[in-house]
Image: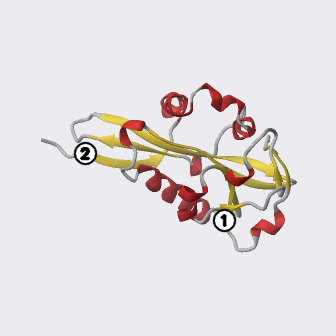
Amino acid sequence: MSSITLKIAPETAEQNEAVEWLGARAFGPGRFARAAFRLREGVGHERAFSFTAVLEDGNGGHVLAGSVRLTRILIGDNPALMLGPLVVSPHFKNLGIGRELMNRSLRMVRLAGERFVFLVGDEPYYRKFGFKALPVGRIILPGPADPARMLYCEMQAGALSDYSGMARRFVQ
């Protein structure tokens, strides 16, 4: 009998289709209408900060268990990162996979000297990673979003003071 190991690694181009499928399964077609999706639409994610979680059985078998992506956006005129989607297969929920993905991704963001990460998500979950509720109206999304779910994490102390206004795609 072989043991199963969890491997967290940078997302590869070869995993793109599987990661997209996992997101579609987790969030359904309604994801296309979300403001966060609109900011990511047509813009590639930052591979340096995007990771997958793969379960390996030691015999060459493996399965994609989760992923996290970060996308470069602009808030006002300042570049920031938007986290999401963070997705874990329903078969592997509550095993700490999301936590491992978040920890790896945010560690790389900090090491790279990034200043600010924004997301739309559940504050009770993301608070353990340093995310806080954004002051209402500080950042405006290109579509409806529950203000209570708009969260931020300063990668550098005081960074929030530089971020306000309309969030939009970062196109190079």
Indicate the secondary structure of the residue bearing disc 2: loop
Q: Is residue 72 left or right of residue 142?
A: left
Residue, disc 1 = 113
Residue 92 at x, y = what percent? 37, 42
Proximity of marks 2 and 1: CB atoms separated by less than 8 Å:
no
Residue 157 at x, y = what percent? 70, 74
**CA separation in Å, label 2 and label 1:** 34 Å
In the picture shown, does residue 14 fall above or below 93? Answer: above
Residue 55 at x, y = what percent? 33, 42
Q: Residues within 10 Å of mark 2 (few under 14, many from 20)?
A: few
Which dot marks residue 144?
none
Amino acid at circle 2: Ile
Q: Quadrant of the C terminus?
A: top right
Q: Sequence-wise, which precedes: disc 2 or disc 1?
A: 2
Circle count = 2
Q: Quadrant of the N terminus?
A: top left
Residue, disc 2 = 4
Taking the spot 36% from the left edge, 50% from the top edge, the residue there is: 95
Colour pattern of the rendering: secondary structure
Q: Is residue 5 left or right of residue 100?
A: left
Residue 65 at x, y = what percent? 40, 40
Task: Name the residue at the left extreme.
Answer: 1
Amino acid at circle 1: Gly
Taking the spot 29% from the left edge, 48% from the top edge, the residue there is: 5
Q: Residues within 10 Å of mark 1 (few under 14, many from 20)?
A: few
